[in-house]
Amino acid sequence: MKFNYLARDQKGETQTGVIEASDYSAALKILQDKGLIVVNLKIGGRAPLISREIKIFNRIKRKDIFVFFRQLAILVDADVPLVQSLNILSKQTESRSLKDIISATASDVDGGMAFSKAMGKHPKVFSIFSVNLIKSGEVSGRLQETLNYLADYLEKEFYLISKVRGAMTYPAFILGAFIIVGVLVMTMVIPNLTSILLEAEQELPVSTKIVIWTSDFIRGSWWLILTFLIVFGFVIARYKKTARGKFYWDMFKLKIPIFGKIFQKTYLARIADNLGTLVKGGVSIIQSLNITGQVVGNAIFQQIIFQARDDVKVGKSISSVLENHEEFPPLFSQMVKTGEKTGKLDIILEKISIFYSKEVDNIVNNLSQIIEPLLIVILGVGVSILVFAVFIPIYNLAGAF
């Protein structure tokens, strides 16, 4: 249940916002625990406009989530009661949004709700993977171990994703800078050189005419180009949200030279890590496959995992499905087969996850050496076009005199 509140802090400053709690008393307790003096508290679904705007700049980061679970695992491991642990973390957390959610979760747990169910009320913060893993820990009585599994998994996933994003920043920056410089040259430099060439009244090469036409088009129709890019970007973004669009976009990502391999190995590491963590945490294999398919983040791999889930229901093995798809290398399917035969699937999956995580690390670490020659070729081609199309005719013109 959501509550809109108006309160004052110890300094007398006014605060407004929205919190989630099981009832009015729980919401009041959450605010009072924060040291706030409640002026007005009422049931509502939308925060005041100012509060909503601030919340946009107070998004909960992936790092905040894994740090929360790491600290919670440490506190529970030290035999601190769960509700008390949550209240402690609520006061320590810097993110206001996460602070409110932890407080609401603590209130729900204090009211008798299971921790996993309380987490499930906040699906944008706690994924279905986290909720089901915690639920398994509660059922098996191994919540402490499960929290450690979850913290380890989220930490590995965070650093893996950070490395991949960091690797893509460099080439994106170089290409972006090249495009900007190219546009500036076309709109500011080429027109001045064009006037010199046209005054000479000489026959210009085809390449020069193309460059001059491109420069004139960019300067004269920049608004048309900008409109097209905005509309095209909007259409692509909308199409990617459809099931068909997401499928083809995810397929395209796996086919991109160099980066396709990074994406593939990242998804393989994620699948092995998710599945291994869930199985080790005591979740049934069918439910583990179902959850892994939902959180893998790629429609192609999701389809394969769901197929494996359905085949396991009728008595088939996971490896028998994986070995029929080229997205899964023979090494992956063979190791899974070994794990199924020996009854050590969770251990094998952990080894697979470590292997592919290291593969991603190696590719990312060597990415600059792979990308730099390609960028040099692209830049060289661009410079060559400008030299041959514009500066060579000027040089010939100067030689004629």
Image (cartoon, rainbow, N blue to C red):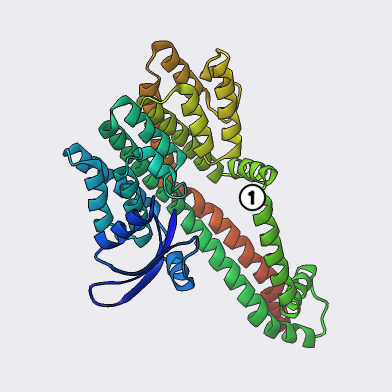
Q: What residue sits 58% from the left and 28% below the top? A: 306
Residue projecting furthest to the left: 78
Residue 341 falls in image quadrant:
top left
Residue 150, image quadrant: top left
Q: Where the C terminus falls, by quadrant?
A: bottom right
Q: How many marks?
A: 1
Q: Nearer the viewer, residue 385 or 79?
A: 79
**Residue 400 visible in the shown view:** no
Percent coordinates x, y for residue 287 in the rendering: 48, 27
- Residue at 54% from the left image edge and 28% from the top image edge: 328
Q: Residue at x 42, y 34 (%)?
A: 132
Residue 81 showing in the rendered view: yes
According to the image, label 1 marks what residue?
A: 241
Horizontally, residue 393 falls left or right of residue 99, namely: right
Measuring from the top left, give residue 397's x and y in whole percent: 73, 82
Vertical placement of residue 355 versus 86, above or below = above
Depth order, front residue of 313/376? 313
| Residue at left offset 72%, top offset 79% | 219
Spot occupied by residue 33 in the image (x, y as percentages of width and height) = 25, 59
Compared across the picture, whether 263 is left or right of 277 comes to right
Q: Is residue 141 above or below residue 117?
A: above
Reply above or below: 351 against 124: above
Return the residue nearer the eye: 8 or 191: 8
Q: Amino acid at mark 1?
A: Lys
Helix, strand or loop for disc 1: loop
- What percent of the width, then of the height, locates residue 14? 33, 75
- Say few, some or many: other residues with alpha carbon within 10 Å of mark 1 (under 14 / 14 to 19 / 20 or more): few
